[in-house]
Amino acid sequence: MVFDIKPEKDVYWCTADIGWVTGHSYVVYGPMINGTTQVMYEGTPDTPTKARIFELIEKYKVSILYTAPTLIRTWMKWGVEFPNSCDLTSLRLLGSVGEPINPEAWMWYREIIGGNRCPIVDTWWQTETGAILISPLPGITHTKPGSAMGTLPGIVAKVIDDEEREVGNGGAGYLALTEPWPSMLRGIWGEPERYAETYWSRFAGKYFAGDGAKLDDDGAIWLLGRVDDVMNVSGHRISTTEVESALVSHPSVAEAAVVGAKDDMTGQGIVAFVILRGGVDHLQGDVLNKELRDHVAKEIGPIAKPRQILVVNELPKTRSGKIMRRLLRDVAENRETGDATTLADPNVMKLIREGLNSGKSED
Ligand code: 7RM
């Protein structure tokens, strides 16, 4: 239903690594159960050229593409000449998964990849949920750039506060699932206490997903990232996702990762790691810094202004494209980096540290 799949006509392609649950579910089981024709690709998106994915879409006339915001932002960074060099008119539906998709990337995906004709399904789910639970339905849901919109039929999600009260439209809090669903996890192998503790102890009788979310005035759901990543600045709770989204809405910024680092004055201070867009002339050093901080203040409010902005070439990510903020926090708080074994590129933390040390001009 989410992909409007027509097995006899569609050519479906989910770009996920099959070591990620999205790969097990939406490269292996799902398409096969549905008898769908699909592309399975093992390789990187920039070999032999940065148009690799687009060449394959053209060659196999892919009609449904399911990918992650991290790749979409990478494409944005590389520039439109690569998608524009291929015929993408076979596409009729686009999907996104793995992290919140910022409105900027959503619009780019819609215009540059989807030619303004393909609906986008922003699909929220977890390894633990076994399948997509929150997503627009194509042709039914009136989508908003950056929102996963609402639950699929039969799924019940609530956004609640610390006291388990529903926050209501316009409010923000924790995402909880209040009814069981097919394919839900029922335990952790050999660790029943950990299962109970992790998912069922925060709110009695509700499944706690670990994600923050807000409901807009129409009741649409906006995912705000893992609650462990929420920052506390002078008593204000600020979501990393919102600050990152504000940063990447600036024309100079391709990608951003934000962490809260210990701060004597404010409890936590916001430290942002940004990758600049290719092929654009940027302001430099302090001027760029000020410009970006002011931009965040304008988009969200002065309290969300990063204390520090560090320009880097890479961000530490898992193979599913999730930023490992824990490692960036180690950098921001001047510690040895902790366990980095799940990084897609084991070298990136070394490169970030080296880059920061060599470019040290301010504070
Ligand atoms: C499918 C997958 C689960 C976590 C989840 C969220 C984040 C996934 C979205 C998303 C915002 C989305 N499974 N997440 N999809 N956040 N919008 N559409 O990623 O087990 O590897 O991760 O991923 O934080 O809790 S997972």
Image (tube, rainbow, N blue to C red):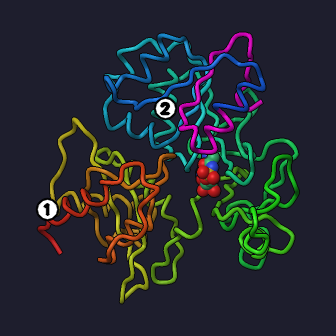
Q: Is residue 279 visible?
A: yes
Secondary structure state at the residue bearing disc 1: loop
Q: Is residue 219 above or below residue 211?
A: above
Q: Is residue 115 left or right of 213 when viewed as pictured? A: left
Q: Is residue 2 above or below residue 57?
A: below
Mark closer to the observer (2, 1): 1
Secondary structure state at the residue bearing disc 2: helix
Q: Residues within 10 Å of mark 2 (few under 14, many from 20)?
A: many
Measuring from the top left, give residue 121's x and y in whole percent.
64, 35
List the residue tagged with mark 2.
109
Residue located 73% across and 31% down the image? 30
Quarter holding the N terminus?
top right
6 is within the stretch colored magenta: yes
Residue located 51% across and 78% down the image? 236
Mark sitting earlier along the chain (2/1):
2
Snapshot quadrant of residue 360: bottom left
Residue located 68% across and 48% down the image? 125
Snapshot quadrant of residue 144: top right
